[in-house]
Amino acid sequence: MAQPLEGLTAIVTGAGRGIGRAEALELARLGARVVVNDFGQPGRAGTGAASAAPAQEVVEAIRAAGGQAVAHTGDVADHQQAGALVQLAIDTYGQLDILVNNAGILRDRMVFSMTEDEWDSVIRVHLKGHFNTTHFAAAHWRARSKEAGGPVFGRIVNTSSEAFLAGSAGQPNYAAAKGGIVGLTTSTALALAKYGVTANAICPRARTRMTEDVFAGIPAPQGGAVAEDGRPDPLAPEHVAPLVGYLASPAAAGVNGQLLVVHGGMVAIAERPRIAAKFDTAKEIFSYEELDGLLTPYYAERPAHETFAAAEVLGLKHD
């Protein structure tokens, strides 16, 4: 029986560790040929000497399981290196079919203490990195579609975060980047649909280098997604990877421009923000006094957890 992704080529960025690693292994398990990208810096802030070891270890794991993979250790936030990544997939396997953007760093700080470099570096890796690879992949699919005279197969899975959905006080750079990724995803979904390409975003929750502080109080069972004693770890990255495999597959042809939250055996589909209330002026233009009379009592009576900047979204508040 053919695998769902058999004959397809995938790129996974930031695939040397954590969620990206689990995604690369899952795509390979489903039959995809995988280009494993990871810059290889040891620090979650994007610091330390780059190394080819993380990406190569994942490549070797895929090959040991009978799959096909090749490593790329470039920086996806560099436009030319992102282009080289996409070209590597094309040169090695003939074409690119799936792009999973996962690479990222953290430089947490409250907004009043954050430096310009801490802001720029996180926006660069997350948001620009997503754009760079998307740009070159989209150009590839558009050219193939024009040559074929019709739609081709293309899948983009981007990585957003609950930090965008619910706010994260100490991560204004990260939350802004993840919100921007959702905007990039929906724009891309609309732009590429006619070429047969879908673009979706996920908000994963998992125990990785990026979240070691967030989940420090939640003990991790040994053994990955399911420990040796049978206890599942709801924060294992392996819980995220199957959704990415599905979104990358032909079965998800009707899923486009979506935002999904995933962790620990749960998938939640997020909607665009809805209008909670609407007020019309009794005159031709609002006055301060009229707005005060309408909005002040409205917000005074509205529970804090129902506001846009609520600390809880979809019942997914961190304990």
Image (cartoon, rainbow, N blue to C red):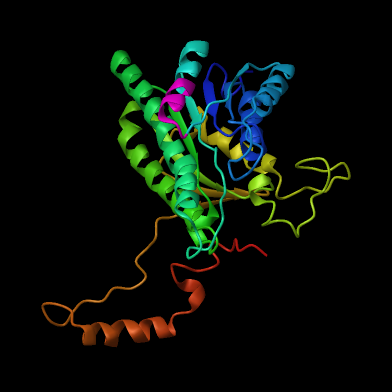
Residue pictured at 47% horizontal, 49% vertical: 117
In which image quadrant can residue 15 be found? Answer: top right
Residue pictured at 70% horizontal, 49% vertical: 235
Image: 249 above or below 266: above
Residue pictured at 70% horizontal, 16% vertical: 66
Q: Quadrant of the N terminus?
A: top right
**Relative to 120, is 187 on the left or the right?**
left
Q: Position of residue 199 (x, y in %)?
A: 42, 37
Image: 98 above or below 19: above
Residue pictured at 53% horizontal, 26% vertical: 74
Q: Is residue 9 found inside the magenta-colored segment of the image?
A: no
Direction right: furthest residue: 229
Is residue 187 at all visible to an observer of this figure?
Answer: yes
Direction left: furthest residue: 284
**Relative to 189, is 203 on the left or the right?**
right
**Relative to 61, is 96 on the left or the right?**
left
The residue range painted magenta reads: 77-85
Q: Position of residue 148 (x, y in %)?
A: 32, 14
The rendered magenta stretch, by its main secondary structure, is classed as helix
Q: Is residue 84 found inside the magenta-colored segment of the image?
A: yes
Q: Quadrant of the C terminus?
A: bottom right
Camera-nearest residue between 285 and 50: 50
Image: 4 above or below 230: above
Is residue 254 at all visible to an observer of this figure?
Answer: no
Camera-nearest residue between 152 and 115: 115
Q: Position of residue 304 (x, y in %)?
A: 49, 76
